[in-house]
Image (cartoon, rainbow, N blue to C red):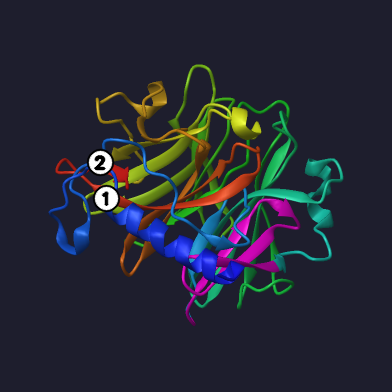
């Protein structure tokens, strides 16, 4: 059997395992479980260039998928089927000199947030260094999303060593009324939210609200999404970026408003450390975190990174289900 045939066979087997494993009840249309599986699910088996960190994934208007992730100049991947990913170059192949004051000269840019609206791709991203809140969030736009096609649209917000917040890990949410919000933050005083101008994508006004915080500060990577009547705030708790020793885990809270207040399943406010665990390390899956949610034609998917036993980062994708009380889980 050739290597390519072996990989295809492994993908089919993994898909069958993902469909049948977990011991959960399946009574919703399309085979979606009604309750969380008894054991944590493994990521869907993926092929190609799936070694990514801090992934964000969208559907392209002409078909297929575009993924962006942390790396030199911000890295891109494409996929036709959400299963096999192909390296597609950098957002800024010539570098981004306007960011180097925050990266100490490094070409690495972090934690992009990718969306498509109004006929173009919007990419919010972070410039910083580890352990510092001398950071900034920038915006770039592109008509195609391809490498080298992106135009710098400017700085959205920055933090300094005197700030009580950290301007990284951005996520754009546009509500039903057309209001734009950017949710972001890492450590310090937790997760923040600001208003954006829909015409420019840049900050509007000076208001900044706190929406989630932990006393030990280990919270970051927010992602806000609406499902039915609730707004769900996905975040990461604990330690990222330590390879197989990472303790990152994916948490969620919800609210009836995109501005919060958000609380977990037990009613604990996220501003008081609340969060319901959705996915944590298990077996050879270490530190699953930096969540994003992809709404596709066949359902919602949690997109995240995790570390293998070797310490290398990998793309994780799992279907999302909702239980009778409206709380999400992955399977």
User: Which residue shows up at 27% across the image and 41% down it?
Assistant: 37
Q: Of tags 1 and 2, which is closer to the observer? A: 2
Q: Quadrant of the N terminus?
A: bottom right
> Which contiguous range is marked in magenta?
62-88
Marks 1 and 2 close (CB-CB < 8 Å): yes
Q: Is residue 319 on the magenta stretch? A: no
Circle 1 Cα neighbour tier, 10 Å, few/some/many (<14 / 14–19 / ≥20): many
Determine if the magenta segment contains residue 78: yes
Please tell me which residue is depicted at 61% across the width and 26% down the height of the picture: 164
Residue under the image location 55 percent in, 62 percent down:
47
Q: Residue furthest bottom?
A: 62
Query: How far apart are labels 1 and 2 at the CA level?
Result: 8 Å
Residue placed furthest toward the right = 105
Residue 13: image location, x then y, percent: 40, 59
**Label 2, on which residue?**
36
Observer-nearest residue: 292 or 195? 292
Secondary structure at badge 1 equals strand
Residue nearest the observer in this picture, 275 or 139 = 275
Q: Main secondary structure of the magenta part?
A: strand
């Amino acid at each position: 059997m050739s290597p390519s045939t072996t990989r295809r066979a492994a993908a089919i087997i993994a898909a069958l395992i993902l469909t049948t494993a977990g011991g959960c009840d399946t009574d919703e249309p399309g085979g979606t479980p009604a309750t969380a599986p008894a054991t944590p699910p493994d990521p869907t088996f993926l092929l190609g260039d799936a070694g990514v960190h801090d992934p964000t994934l969208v559907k392209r208007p002409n078909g297929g998928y575009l993924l962006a992730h942390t790396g030199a100049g911000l890295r891109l991947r494409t996929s036709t089927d959400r299963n096999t990913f192909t390296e597609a170059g950098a957002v800024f192949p010539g570098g981004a000199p306007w960011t180097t004051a925050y990266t100490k000269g490094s070409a690495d840019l972090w934690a992009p947030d990718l969306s498509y609206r109004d006929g173009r791709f919007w990419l919010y991203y972070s410039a910083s260094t580890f352990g510092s809140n001398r950071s900034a969030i920038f915006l770039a736009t592109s008509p195609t999303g391809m490498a080298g096609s992106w135009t710098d649209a400017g700085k959205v917000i920055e933090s300094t060593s005197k700030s009580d917040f950290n301007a990284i890990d951005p996520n754009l949410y546009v509500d039903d009324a057309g209001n734009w919000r950017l949710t972001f933050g890492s450590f310090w005083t937790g997760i923040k939210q600001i208003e954006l101008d829909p015409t420019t994508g840049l900050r509007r006004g000076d208001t900044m609200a706190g929406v989630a915080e932990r006393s030990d500060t280990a919270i970051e990577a927010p992602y806000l999404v609406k499902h039915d009547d609730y707004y769900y705030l996905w975040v990461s708790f604990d330690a990222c970026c330590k390879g197989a020793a990472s303790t990152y885990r994916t948490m969620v809270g919800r609210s009836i408003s995109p501005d919060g207040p958000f609380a977990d399943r037990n009613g604990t406010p996220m501003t008081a450390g609340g969060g319901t665990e959705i996915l944590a390390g298990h077996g050879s899956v270490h530190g699953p975190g930096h969540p994003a949610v992809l709404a596709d034609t066949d359902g919602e998917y949690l997109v995240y990174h995790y570390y293998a036993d070797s310490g290398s980062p990998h793309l994780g994708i799992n279907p999302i289900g909702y239980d009778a009380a409206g709380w999400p889980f992955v399977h």
